[in-house]
Image (cartoon, rainbow, N blue to C red):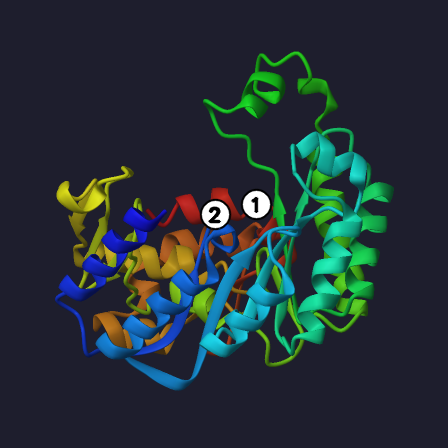
Amino acid sequence: MDAYFDMLSEEISLSPYTGREVSSVYFGGGTPSLADPLKIRGILDQLRKEFRILADAEITIEMNPGTVSREKLRIYRESGINRLSVGLQSCSDEMLKKLGRIHTFRDFSDTFWMAREEGFENISLDLISGLPGETPEIFRDSLEKAIAFAPEHISVYSLIIEENTPFYALYGPSGKKRGELPDEETERGISHLADRVLEASGYEKYEISNYAKCGYESRHNLGYWTGVPYLGFGAAAASYVGGRRFRNAMDDDYLSLPYEECEVLEKEDLMAEMMILGLRLTKGVSLSSFQKRFGKDLMEVYGPVVEKYRSLGALALSGDRLFLTDYGMDAANVVMADFL
């Protein structure tokens, strides 16, 4: 871990983009809360020296229940971290066990209230839907228990099973437990249930998978979806700046290796990306912003695609904004693919 943080520090010091203004800092997964909190503080101190981090910047760290102590949380606060993203995943111990998580619901509860006692006023919880054996009733119970903690932000992600994982062997296309996964109709019902329950509890859906109390939308994630440049430091970290996207190698000694990916995005790529990412947001894409950015009318470029999905009831146009309808949210991947 010491060697990794040394390499991370060196990468930051060598960045050609130092001196730029920064509105958000995000320590993402793996599980950064496993690291020595003094290492995290050291990286933040270095970032402040190398970049112009705004006084009101959103500074987030991802953490799993049971991986932090009161001392860790105190050091986070003293370091300037003002937002926690907690990987709760489920309030059902049975579901957590199926996921292979190391924590229980009680562990999460202890961690959450300890964070509140240490002064954290912006906490986001991650939940996963569509788990093996999960019914709408089990999910609703989990969701209502999470809401009872009154976090400022809740993300609800559908389970995605990646190849070359233990989960894939069990629940992939030929897995012996494939039948335990909820079918498509059940998953869609769970998604609609999340919308209804969270809205009734004061959370606004602002993106396909994200809900927030007023003023607590994730500034960091909004940046991704609206084309704000970002720099990624660390193994496999991705960056997008100056019309270029590049990704570090996924290796312990990544700094000595060439980029794993590096591409210059052409105008057509950037237009398609604005549509795909922008349509993730419930407010959709601004036609005037598209015109200002690319010097082209959105309907001239994508008129046939837009009209196709408007006629199917998946897209709606209101004033300056084009956005997915509730039906369109269910078919978002299909709709977005047509803008490529």
Q: Looking at the image, is 52 positioned above or below residue 208?
A: below
Q: Residue 110 at x, y = what percent?
A: 76, 59
**What's the residue at 49%, 30% (across, down)?**
162
Could you say whether the residue bearing mark 1 is in a helix, strand or loop?
loop
Horizontal side of residue 226 vs 189, given as left or right: left
Q: How many marks?
A: 2
Mark identifier at residue 331: 1
User: Is residue 239 at least partly visible in the picture?
Assistant: yes
Which quadrant holds residue 301?
bottom left
Picture residue at 59% right of the left edge, 55% below the top: 209
Q: Amino acid at mark 1?
A: Ala
Point out the residue furthest to the bottom here: 55
Q: Callout 2: helix, strand or loop?
A: helix
Q: Position of residue 248 (x, y in %)?
A: 24, 46
Give how far across and how far down residue 317 sits, in percent.
Answer: 51, 68
Q: Residue at x 28, y 67 (%)?
A: 229
Q: Residue drawn 52% across and 71% down?
A: 75
Q: CA distance from mark 2 to mark 1?
A: 6 Å
User: Does the rendering let one see residue 225?
Assistant: no
On residue 335, the disc is: 2
Say above or below: 265 vs 242: above
Q: Is residue 148 left or right of residue 223?
A: right
Location of residue 274 (image quadrant): bottom left
- Side of 88 where 34 appears, left or right: left
Vertical relation: 285 (above or below) 259: below
Dot 2 and dot 1 residues touching (CB under 8 Å): yes
Amino acid under label 2? Val
Where on the picture, by quarter, is residue 169?
top right
Q: Position of residue 94 (x, y in %)?
A: 80, 35
In the image shown, does 5 or 217 lie closer to the viewer?
5
